[in-house]
Amino acid sequence: MHLGSNWCVGIYQHALHLGGIQCPNNSALQEVKNCNDHPCTVYHWQTGPWGQCIEDSSIPATNTSAGRTRADDASCSVGMQTRKVICVRVNVGQVPPKKCPESLRPDTVRPCLLPCKRDCIITPYSDWSPCPSTCQAGGNTKKKQYRKRIMIQIPANGGQDCPEVLTQERECDAPSVCQGYRWKTHKWRRCQLVPWSVRQDSPGAQETCGPGLQVRAVSCRKQDGGQADVVACLKFASSMPPLTHPCQLPCQEDCQLSSWSKFSSCTADCVGVRTRKRMLVGKSKKHDQCKNNQMYPQSETQYCPCNKYNAQPVGNWSDCVLPEGGRVEGQLGMKVQGDIKECGQGYRYQAMVCYDQDNRIVETSRCNSHGYIEEACIIPCPSDCKLSEWSNWSRCSKSCGSGVKVRSKWLREKPYNGGRPCPKLDHVNQVYEVVPCLSDCGQYVWVAEPWSVWKVSNVDLKDNCGEGVQTRKVRCMLNTVDGPSEQAEDYLCDPEEMPLGARNSRLPCPEDCVLSDWEAWKPCPLPCSGNSSRERSAYPLRQPGEEKECPPTQETELCKLNSNCFHYSYNITDWSTCQLSERAVCGNGIKTRMLDCVRSDGKSVDLKLCKELGLERKWQMNSSCIVECPVNCQLSEWSPWSECTHACGLAGKLWRRRTVIQAPQGDGRPCASQMEQWKPCLVKPCYSWRYSFWSECKSEGARCGEGLRFRNVSCFVSDGSGQQESSLVDDELCGDLEPSVDGDAHIVLQEPCTVPCPGECYLTDWTVWSPCQLSCVSGDDLGFGSVQVRSRAVVAQDPENLLQCPEQELEARPCTEGQCFEYKWKTGPWRGSSRQVWCQRSDGLNVTGGCPVTAKPMADRSCDPPCTKPRSLCTEAGVCGCEDGYTEVMTSDDLLDQCTVIPVLEIPTAGDNKADVKTIRGFNPTQPAASSPGRAGRTWFLQPFGPDGKLKTWVYGVAAGAFVLLVFITSMTYLACKKPKKPQRRQMNNRLKPLTLAYDGDADM
């Protein structure tokens, strides 16, 4: 036991002031007492806070009602609270419970009082809200009626939850359709004076002026305009218009004014004001008091009515349209027939549609619009092909005989936007003009200068002679009348006739014979043959000396064809291009060709060689020709704009067209591609009379049998596209239309019908014949011919009658030109345990029959027995399961017992002794219903969750035990598989080592 002391020391709180009491001594300011005089304990128990009060299943059920005897007692049953108790060593922490004395261990469980479960309490459903009792003019919209119940008490403490559905709705029975009756008002009659005696119930003088009444007649009309009894309008039409109207008969001294004029038209809705006027008549114009505008206003102003309208563009932009008398450009320079180019700035249009606040189409003037959006556009002008001027003629392609001369133009600018096309160009974008030409073969000649002096290469010094070389210059010269005049290019002269420019020869020695140069070969005799020959000769210039002779002065060689002997013939050239007179671009011209003298080896030679042989010339050298003049395409004027293709709606178009008067010729400008133009019409609403749906068949004064059904005719508006439903509008808007429905002027507003009596079957009228259809399989005709069918359905008042009636009657008849269809089953989404299944034809029409019955998908997946447990549903496998977020709790015979919320555990942190259970839904999970006593004997299952939705305590114990067991198994497996170590002296310690796993290592044990 440890003894200590506490020291308590006082402090001077006030200084000693003059005249004050003297402070006590220091010993009087100290007090000493003993502390920590209890026995010192090292181990002690530590308790945690008490947990929530939960239901104790060990207490008999009879005790649970004890608390309900007193109305003011909030506790209804005895529960149980638990807390955590641990053994703690001072300054160390938690240690095993055996360290602390068991006798002093605090309680871990104590009884507690549970609050009463409070179930949800709701009222019964209210009565259904009333359906419309009056008939409807449209007759095609069904109203709904509702009923609801109210939550009186909110559930608490695990009581039964409130149902999710607190309101219900259902469609009203089909409302009766108002029979087609309406009031027709007639003109007001003259104002009739009401005597004062009548007004005041007393006799008086005869009045001639004052307040009176106007009367008018009101009659009853059918919707088709026919007469009807007033009783029908009183029953089925709106309230009767007033028959009388107060008026004023002016007295002589009264101011008399004309009736009000109509209000002036508004320029636009919601903008500006409209006025109406009246004026003084008769003697009232002279009375000053009548000119008082406050007493007798002669004009009245009011704001224009304001309805909300919305304008929207609709459709595509039109073609670009030039204004009338628009820009027309002609070609500069020469005027060619039909050379007119239409281009420049035009306008394109897009229609505007106007809707009111109910999204009904109205006249475009309501949106302050003239009906179009206008946008400037450009029609590009055509640009013609542009070529350069002609180049100069080239030199004749041959220097001997016939050749060609060429001149050309090259491309400067390509055509675009429908301009005049270019003539045919070559790969370098040039166009050529070629004419034949004839060159004199003697025009260019070779001219050789005299041989140079000998240049001796091997000299005989004794005789001063030997081998040597002579050279000379050879030039191509232009041959004129006066002889060769100027040098030309060598290619212009015939290379075969070019003289030698150098020769090897021997410088004659003294007394040698010297001969002249060889003369030209004599011509071979014609025709050439291998037996003929030709020769040439030379003559001696110096006679030889003694004992020396001259070489031969004659040389002969055989004539060979195309070697030294040739045949000659005429060759005709191709025609030239058509040559026009100067400055002409088209019209008549001349084309020429030429004769050429050709040697048998193909070489052109001088024409005189053929002339000397006297060859026949049978060809015409000139011929007339025509160059086609370019003619541009010529179009007619645009026709006037056509009538609108649609009388109303969004799709109307105006068209104008033009035709080709003159097709293009030659290199004329081609025709424009646009031969027609369109622009949108003014959008107009489409008004039409339409029937409402037939009312239910009503048998007057009887439950069943013969009766009548009615329908109405109303005015509808649409945009004509067929994509938007028609909207009901005032009948006055259809006032200009003939009373007809879908083109049928015979309007039928009632017809006899039959109300089926119990136990009887009635059939509807036959439907129209279906389209003609072939018998096909996978698109292949089976060869059975075409058929069309019609049917009529069964009408039965009571559902049980349907069992005695046929499903429907069918009729078939052959037809021609049938169409092949394919049929497929279609399914809708599952809704609970059922879904819709229907047969659809390949053209999108839903039909009865046609699809193979054996391949029909399942339409019902209901379970047997049905799924009646809360949160249960029938699965596709045909067994009962639970909704998402809930898990199935099954009975021993594999039947669903209940659906329990799947918990999401949240691991508690340090210092938190509660483990909250998170559920998938944000509200308290639905509690399972208490098991019936009859099932307790044959069905048993663990329930890990308490009534409050939290895990029970034993679940934590089982989890902890499972964890310890897992650690033990793992450790034993490790030790069993571990390799044995070498034996040590202390065998006993090794055998006891596994026991240390459960020892906390406390040295004070």
Image: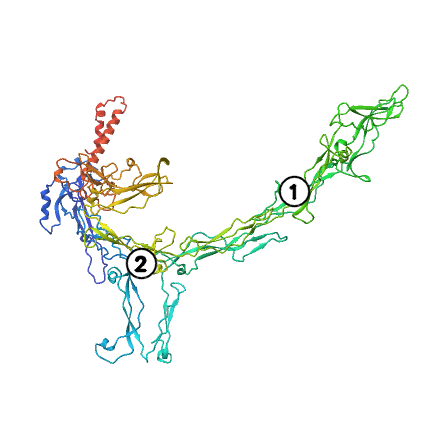
In this rendering, the count of numbered labels is 2
Label 1 neighbour load within 10 Å: few <14, some 14-19, many 20+ = some
Q: Position of residue 284 (x, y in %)?
A: 36, 79
User: Circle 2 sits on which residue?
Assistant: 224
Q: Quadrant of residue 790?
A: top left
Observer-nearest of 728 and 595: 595
Q: Residue furthest top?
A: 547
Point out residue 505 in the picture as x, y percentages from the top left corner: 82, 25
Q: Residue at x 22, y 28 (%)?
A: 994
The three-letter code of the residue at mark 1 reads Tyr
**Quarter of the N terminus within the rendering:** top left
- The answer to whether residue 277 is seen in the rendering is yes
Q: Nearer the viewer, residue 117 or 300?
A: 300
- Sequence order check, earlier mark of 1 and 2: 2
| Identity, as a three-letter code, of the amino acid under mark 2 | Asp
Provide the secondary structure element on which disc 2 rests.
loop
For numbered disc 1, what is the local secondary structure? strand
Q: Give the answer, above or below, for where 458 lies relative to 479.
A: above
Q: Residues within 10 Å of mark 2 (few under 14, many from 20)?
A: some
Image coordinates of residue 861 in percent, x first then y, are: 24, 38
| Tag 1–tag 2 contact (CB < 8 Å) | no
Say left or right for 61 vs 823.
left
Q: Residue 432, which numbered label?
A: 1
Residue 934 vertical placement versus 741 (above, below): above
Quadrant in which the C terminus appears: top left
Whether residue 231 sits left or right of residue 114 in the image: it is: right
Q: Is residue 649 above or below residue 525?
A: below
Say whether residue 92 is visible: no
